[in-house]
Each structure stands twice: as C-alpha cells, then as structure tokens.
Image (cartoon, rainbow, N blue to C red):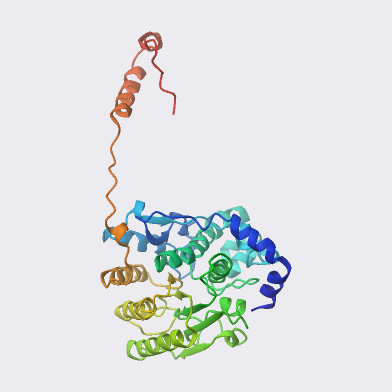
Amino acid sequence: MSDELKEKDEDSSEATKRELHETSLYQDVKPTQWPIIYSPEYNIGFLGLEKLHPFDAGKWGKVYGFLKEAKMIRDDTTVRATEATERDLLVVHTKGYLNTLKWSFHVAQITEVPPVAFLPNFIVQRKVLRPFRYQTGGTILAGKLAQERGWAINIGGGFHHCSANQGGGFCAYADITLSIKFMFDRLQSISKVLIIDLDAHQGNGHERDFMDDDRVYIMDVYNRGIYPYDGFAKRAIKRKVELSHGTDDEVYLELVDRHTKEALEEFQPDAVVYNAGTDILEGDPLGNLSITAQGIIERDRLVFSHVRSRNIPILMVTSGGYQRSTARIIADSILNLKQLGLIPCEDAENAPKPRFMIPRSQSEGFIARIKRSCQPETNQSSTTQKGDTPLADT
C-alpha cells in the first residue's frame, strides 16, 4: 500500500467509514435493470478540443448506442451513474491533489491537451473533469452491483494511470482504487481483490496505491515499450506479463488464458476488477500491439469465462482505446458475452417495455390551452367555470 494511502487509513479511518455510509454512489437498482452502468455525462466535448487527443472522447456514448440498437438494453433497463463528489474522492485522493485540479494548467498536463491550460477552470471542471467524476462514480457503483449480481460493466472508467496523489495519461481520478476501497469498507464479503489489467499500458496508478497491500493481487499484461515506464510501480505487480511491439492474437490469447487461470488459482479472490482496454487493437497509435477485433472479443470471453465459472464477482471497465472502431468492438464483445450466457440478467431481458402514452386529461388540457390562447383575454376569464382550475404557465 502506498505511503499516502497508509497515512489516510491511519489518520482518518473512522471518518472514511462515516463517509462511505453517507455516500449516494452505492444506490439500489431495480431487478429489471442490467448491471450495466452509463450516463450521457460520460462524454467529453467542448469546441472540438477533445479532438486534439487521440482518445475518442465520445466512445462511451457510442458503445451505449450500439447496445441499444442491438436491443440488449433500453434507457429504463440501464443503471444511470451518479457523479462522485469531493467527499467521495477523498476516500482515496489527498486534498492536495484535488486542489491541483483547480488549476487548468495541471489538468492540461493530465489530459495531454495543451489548450486546456488556457480555459477558465470552471469550464474545465464542467466539460472535462465532471465527465471523469461521473465515470468514477460508475466504477464505484459497479463494485456493489458485481457483488450483488455476480457481474457488472461500467461503460466508462478504467483510469489506471491515476493514483492517490498524481494523475496522468488522460486519467484524473483513481476510479479503480476507489472502487476497491469502497468494496473493502462496505461489502463484508469482499476482503481480497484481483486486478486483471489488460490495457496496452502498465496500470501504474493502482499499482502505486496498492503497493505492499496483500489484499490486492495485480496481474498486468502490457507493452513494455510504451508509456508510462514506471519501474517503481512494477514492484506492486504480482503477475507481470510484458509484451513486445506487434504481439499478435496467437501469442497474446495464450498468455491471457494461462495467466488469468493461474492468478485465480493462486490468489482465490473474492472479486475481480477487469480493466478491459481496447488500445491493444492493431493500428492503435499508442498501444503498438497487433490484436484483431476478434482477438479482443475472445480475450474478454476468456476472462469472464474463467472468473464466472468460479462464481467470483467481476466488474469490468473499458479503459483505453484510441481508434474510432473501438466503440463497436466493445459493444460487440458485450453482446457476445450475453449470447454465451456469461452476463445473464433474466429480469432485465423480460422487462416489459414502457408505454409512452399521454393521459387523456393532459391532452385535453393542452388543446384547451391552445384555444384560450386564441381568445380575447375577457373571454378567457368568462369561460372558466366555477370549480375549474386554470392551467398554470409552463
């Protein structure tokens, strides 16, 4: 465990427990809702600045749209994420780090979009950091839903380069660390968590946070020749699988299959956090690996199959992926998991469709309002009968 987290645990454990009990992030959801978490607030967009980074800042909404088109989910059968507040974030983050996010220059460094430095911070908070806070809230909630349902997917999240006191690599909040801390403190059945990080990049954020913490076992499969080159954080990895540029499906899938199975058998966790980055896709400008779309779908199947066959709760976050095609691949992978029966939710599948009908009384009131608008004011008052209530302005 990092020095920052140790200090917070020792100095404010009671305050943290009170905070966790007061948080609104651990919401109850209906049985007819899939444990799939999303909010329109996930997506980032402001004057085209999001296009200055290779990350598709609207991919989360596209994934959601594809799943709706496939008729797997509807708005009423999906869990809506809520925004993580500062008090929620302080469960892991230092006050000093959160204060640095009030400086646009620092956020520009984290997001790797230099023009952000010149924006007023209130705009940066609303257009850049607020979407990250919503996604962080989704990852935290996914921990609770995974424990209750056996699995959960946050369509966003996976900010694995952010630690308690440092952001970077387009990661401003340590959502993975936060989700695990919430599980440890609020879910009695969860005392050991396995992180399976299959993003193309090393997950140095959660690694720094859980350094020397025996409750967390980290398996990280990443390209050793790309960012972040964090040698110190590597000390936290219990199962390190370093890849070379251009690694293909055959080599990659054999490694994922074998090491996932061995990690589960060795650690026997109470829950699994799966960081399912798609920047391993061939052609990705930052990942530099050569995994096909079908290879990504098969990778996700392998992970879910191994974990679910052992009745271990699993939560998945989507993490990196820097090509426009990744949204379609993520959606196709989720649909494949559903078709294979690895992410069942019978109540949601059988949920009746809502009937969007305007009550007769409302439609009559609307027509009456139009008629009154066409009448002289004197006639309007004279047509109101005793006992009637005039429509209020809207």
Q: Dividing the picture into quarters, in which one does residue 248 lie?
A: bottom left
Q: Dividing the picture into quarters, in which one does residue 381 lie?
A: top left
Question: Looking at the image, how many numbered discs can be counted on the residues?
Answer: 0
Q: Determine whether, in the image, residue 56 is placed left or right of residue 4.
A: left
| Closest to the observer, 231 or 386 | 386
Residue sitting at the far front = 188
Q: Dividing the picture into quarters, in which one does residue 112 lie?
A: bottom right
| Closest to the observer, 339 or 363 | 339
Return the x and y of residue 361 as percentages of the image width and height: 31, 26
Taking the image as drawn, is residue 217 in sight?
yes
Q: Is residue 27 above or below residue 253?
A: above
Residue drawn 43% across the image and 55% down it: 29
Return the x and y of residue 93 as percentages of the image width and height: 64, 67
Q: Is residue 33 above or below residue 204?
A: above
Residue drawn 44% across the image and 91% down it: 244
Q: Determine whether, in the image, residue 305 is placed left or right of residue 274.
A: left
Residue drawn 46% across the image and 59% down it: 42
Return the x and y of residue 282 as percentages of the image width and height: 36, 81
Please identify the quadrant where the C terminus is shown.
top left
Please identify the quadrant where the N terminus is shown.
bottom right
Taking the image as drawn, is residue 99 in sight?
no
Return the x and y of residue 141 as percentages of the image width and height: 49, 62
Residue sitting at the far right = 11
| Closest to the observer, 361 or 201 | 361
